[in-house]
Image (cartoon, grey):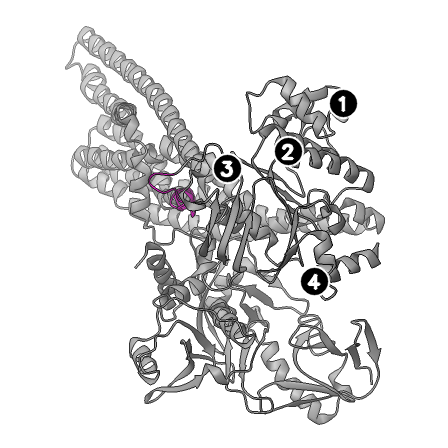
Amino acid sequence: MESMLVRRSDDGAIRKAAGGLTLEWRADGSLWAMRGDEERAVSVRRAFPWTEPTRHLSLRDADEEEFALVKDPAELDARSRAALERALAVAGFVFEVTRVLEIDEEVEIRRWRVETRQGPRTFQTRLDDWPRTLPHGGLLIRDLAGDLYHLGAPGQLDRHSRDLLWAFVD
Amino acid sequence: MSTQQQLDDHIIERYTAQPTRLPLELRREIEHAWHGAPIQLYALADLDQSLVLAETWFALGPRHIAVAKRDSEGWDVRSIERASIEAVREAPGLSANTLTILGAPGEPALALLRYTHRQRRAFENIRFVLEEQVQGHTRELADGEADRLYAESVARPIRDAQALVSGRQTAVIRRLLGYLKPYRRDLTLGMAAATVITLVSLIPPYLAGYLIDRVVRPAQAGTLSLGRAGTIAALAVAAMAAVYLVKQAAAYVRLRLMAILGEWVARDLRDQLYEHIQRLSLAFFSRKRTGSLITRVSADTDRLWEFLAFGIVDVSLSLVQLLGLGTVLLSLDWRLGLVMTLPIPVFCWVIYRHGENISRLFIRAWRKWSRVTDVLSDTIPGIRVVKAFNQEDREIARFGERNADVTAEFNRIHASWTTFWPLLVLGVHAMTITVWLFAVPRLLGTGPQLPVGTFVSFLLYTTMFLAPIDVIGQMARTINRATTSAHRVFEVLDTEPEIREVAEPVRLEPVHGRVTFEHVTFGYDGVRQVLRGVSFDVAPGELIGLVGPSGGGKTTIVNLIARFYDVSGGAIRIDGVDLRQLDTGHYRRQIGMVLQDPYLFHGTVVENIRYGLPEAPLSDVVRAAQAANAHDFITKLQHGYDTVVGERGHTLSGGERQRVSIARAILHDPRILILDEATSSVDTETEREIQQALERLVAGRTVFAIAHRLSTLRKASRLFVIEDGRLIEHGTHAELLARPEGTYRRLYDLQVQLA
């Protein structure tokens, strides 16, 4: 098992411990990570959200300290893996754009009106903030508030969307 | 309702498609459930548990919180007593955040809310209050602020990016034209000259037709004597010469007057803009990027000059010229006139569409251009890293690839316009050919009569069509560009300074330097507090060391003393007078600052030392430099005190710049002095020299010194330990060391261990 537990000892120094890591959702609505006699409520951060979204997952406690680094969820038991996947769905949530309805420019900002899998959405970007091309294709747009919009395959959108996106896609 | 809140409401309505307020009926329902207690803060949880966009409201009152979900029958409201909350946890995600409100350990969560980053600021306000409560601190919130705080938190990212969202294009142009008022006379003359140019341009083709029909052909036919024909022709040619002279004279007047007038307006705008920028509070500068502000003063005003000097006249006179041409052509021959005038709207539309298409091409090219400049701005400042890792070839390849990419885009733009314009001119020629097709049979005697001269005039007029069509076709783009620049300029001009003078400000003469904090609270936004009830009294001449962990509030304290911001609660008194009652300019002249990274302006060393007192005698400058341990190194420079430093000037080391800034502070002779990490970034020897200089500087003044190296503060009269926005310990170095469990003792021991 490659998952590593990074444990904080009493003097604050970090040491690594081997052993089984298990995960579960509890009634308090939090994901709990357990190893040996230590357990903590954690949240999940992807170390490589776009390059390798399903591996190298950092489990962090309320103080943002890393409790464990899961290199590959396949190495967890089935129950823990299911718990982790549920947490990943929330942690990795971004809007999935299915149609682009309008892109308009105003002073300093660009206005986008889109349809997403989660519902219709209007957002704004700075004029000089360009969509980012992701390692495995697709586009990622970050709006002024910091929300992310993913276009998995811009070339497969409807024609109107493709026309509007033309200036933003290589 | 304040103007700010109106703007925030407008932003939410226009840009976010979410409610501008908590629904009124829901507010009533929640407050009813709370027995009339008011909602003090609220936020919208815009995602449900399955991460679909939804509408769930989260409200906070003095003793309760409430979660309200919209269902088919209205609102499902659940109230929870705040006293039952034992923990609050937020899990941030890429775009979905989760706030969990917890009660007793092991019990189900009291509430679990999911929301996007757009709502996160509003949720943070509530989370902050609840966390304070959990930690045992009371946080009193003012009633009636909930709507404002919600609107501000949602609208702020958009407002920071674009403050003048409510400006309509016509209103902006009207306001811009208002700047022409002082130059009415020149504007009238310039417009009159431009009108003359337009009108006299119509005369030569008419004269050509007149000469052919009324002089040449009658003379050839023998119905007009050669002598009389010669006289008339000479007069006509003379008239034509006069027309051209008048036209060029008018062109001279127009170009000269309008260009100069445009410059005056741009100058006025730059002056007004710069003066306003100087008066704005620090908060404004932390929101806006320096480059963006510089662009507004330079490039935007320059673009407005172009619009005012030429754009307005070109657009308005092109309309007049097209109308004039259409009228003349229709009056000369209405059939041929229709052939020429009917396609004009089509041409304007085609040019407009071409402009739109070119804009799209430019966006693409601009995006790729930014990838080229990204490489430059990465690798030129980071050239040492590039070389250290032997990555020159890779960077050359990366640049080459992007450069080729952007060149392809520019060539695409060139392919577009170089195809379009010949085609457009071909279209105009097609109109001329059509005119010929209609005219030739008539010239040969078939159909209604068409005099040859009239036809020649007609042909000459057709050559004048293209220019005004081009201007009108591009009118939308010209106006858009100008209003965009005007928007950016007016946005700054309309920003109100957050520090305001009272009607009759007090001047302390002299300032003794007593500084009193009375329960001072401060937050950069309405809810989260950076300082929480800080109180102290500092006597004139005391040296106070501010110590504590980073982010604890030390810099905020000195920023408040300098009145860069006003307190949110409590008061700061200088010699017993509330700081907000003082004449800010006069008061700041009594304040000196030596910062961690001293800023020297482009100019000579002497100009930098005399920055606060430009008239100070040179002997005083030398004395100040000597006291700052700067005189020695300055006189070793080739040009001594006259050495040009700062950007593009002689490069001084960090320690040298610091000593020049200390000399500047010594010469300024402030009553209250702020030292913010003045010696943190220099070597030990330089630190010793700077310490000596500082010891001379602090004598006889009230000093607030921030330092992480606690050893530098041993001579302080008292030390204030600031942590988490509170003054947690104070006393002399020895007194604080004597507290074995104290924070200061712990910090000091840690530094001794590391040394």
Q: Inspect the image, locate mark 4, and give the three-letter code of the amino acid beneath it.
A: Thr
Residue stretch in magenta: B485-505
The residue labelled by disc 3 is B588
Residue type marked 2: Leu
Q: Residues within 10 Å of mark 4 (few under 14, many from 20)?
A: many
- Asked whether disc 2 touches disc 4, contact meaning CB atoms under 8 Å apart, the reply is no
Report the Cα–Cα distance between label 4 and label 1: 46 Å
Identify the chain of the residue marked 1, using the numbered disc in the image: B
Question: Label 3 is placed on what type of residue?
Answer: Arg
- Chain identity of mark 2: B
Please indicate whether residue B359 sits to the left or right of residue B749 in the image: left
Q: CA distance from mark 3 to mark 2?
A: 19 Å
N-terminal label among 2 and 4: 2
Indicate which disc, 1 or 2, sits on the residue closer to the N terminus.
2
Residue B444 in sight: no
Report helix, strand or loop for mark 1.
Answer: loop
Residue type (three-letter) at the residue carrying disc 1: Leu
Give the quarter of the figure containing the N terminus of chain B. bottom left
Q: Classify B587 as above or below B232.
A: below
Give the letter of the chain under mark 4: B
